[in-house]
Image (cartoon, grey):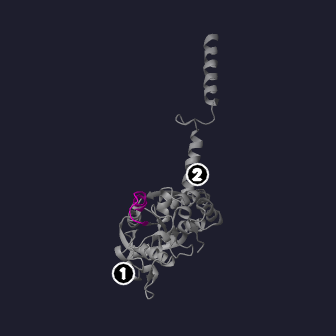
Amino acid sequence: MGRDLLFVLLFGALLILAACGSDEPTDAKNGETEAETADDAEETTEATENGEIETLVVGASNVPHAEILEEAAPLLEEEGIELVIETFQDYILPNTALEEEDLDANYFQHIPYLNLQIEEHGYDFVSAGGIHIEPIGLYSKRHESIDDIPEGGTILMGNSVANHGRALAMLEREGLLTLDESVDKTEATVEDIVDNPLDLQFNYEFEESYLPQVYENDEGDAVLINSNYALDVGLNPLEDSIAIEESDSPYANVIAVRNGDEEQEKIKKLVEILRSDEIQQFILDQWGGSVVPVSE
């Protein structure tokens, strides 16, 4: 009887120790207790339900748009918005993706281009706000100065008509041509040139993204390149161009959204942060004036 009693006592003690060895069972995969795992899941659910965590998907050109968005991402995260940046290499797909609701917004185009796309494709888009200006520049492998462009010289441009007016207005300012005064300069084309003393020839058959390669191939006397594409291949618009658009250009790059979405809080917060002193100073520091922030 003594041995049986001892065995019972030892067995009972082992059961008590097993029960007391851990107040909360652990998750075998990550070492967390079931209670901790449940708490984490509950916190995540509550955050989602309370609108504290939102995802914002924005399509953008690589430079400078995506880099500006990357700088803004931590500030948006503090506001409970997770920014997802989708990069594009052309000017067509970002609007297609926005139309198909693969994006919440895009950030790559200026107002005249946006208006032209709306007119041509019937997009129901609006601008949620302008963020920065990228001056268009004239680049040349053959000439060190715009004054060196010869009679009959060839100027190469992109095939986006929305950029022709700004390019021609810059050339007019430099004294190379004169545009019809009755035409809105943002809508001007080569057909609106009324005086061309050097008999310059204009070739505008190139995709905008291909213009830096045209420049590197030394095609034509000079090439007009948007700053985002120039920056993307390591060109400095202020140092490498032989002429550049003035900073008061009306071609502000905007956050474009589907009509009505500009009232969403996460879109408003995006524009607010991109226009903040911190992001505007980043733009100035990063690109030294070749990309110019706007506040309105």
Q: Which quadrant of the figure has residue 76?
A: bottom right
Do we see residue 116 in this rendering? yes
Q: What residue is at 58 percent from the left and 68 percent from the top?
A: 292
N-terminal-most mark, 2 or 1 = 2
**Secondary element at image label 1:** helix
The percent coordinates of residue 209 (x first, y second) are: 41, 61
Residue 145 inside the magenta-drawn segment: no
Amino acid at circle 1: Glu
- The circle on residue 154 is none
| Relative depth, front residue between 108 and 159 | 159
Above or below, comparing residue 289 to residue 84 in the picture? below
Q: Quadrant of the C terminus?
A: bottom right
Q: Which quadrant of the figure has residue 92?
A: bottom left
The percent coordinates of residue 174 (x first, y second) are: 51, 76
Residue 221 inside the magenta-drawn segment: yes
Q: What residue is at 49 percent from the left and 73 percent from the top?
A: 127
The percent coordinates of residue 36 (x first, y second) are: 60, 42
**Residue that numbered label 1 is attached to:** 191
Amino acid at circle 2: Glu
Q: What residue is at 64 percent from the left and 11 percent from the top?
A: 2
Alpha carbon distance from label 2 to label 1: 63 Å
| Relative depth, front residue between 91 and 73 | 91
**Residue that numbered label 2 is attached to:** 43
Q: What residue is at 45 percent from the left and 73 percent from the top?
A: 167
**Secondary element at image label 2:** helix
Residue interval drawn in magenta: 211-222
The percent coordinates of residue 102 (x first, y second) are: 41, 61
Image check: 269 left or right of 164?
right
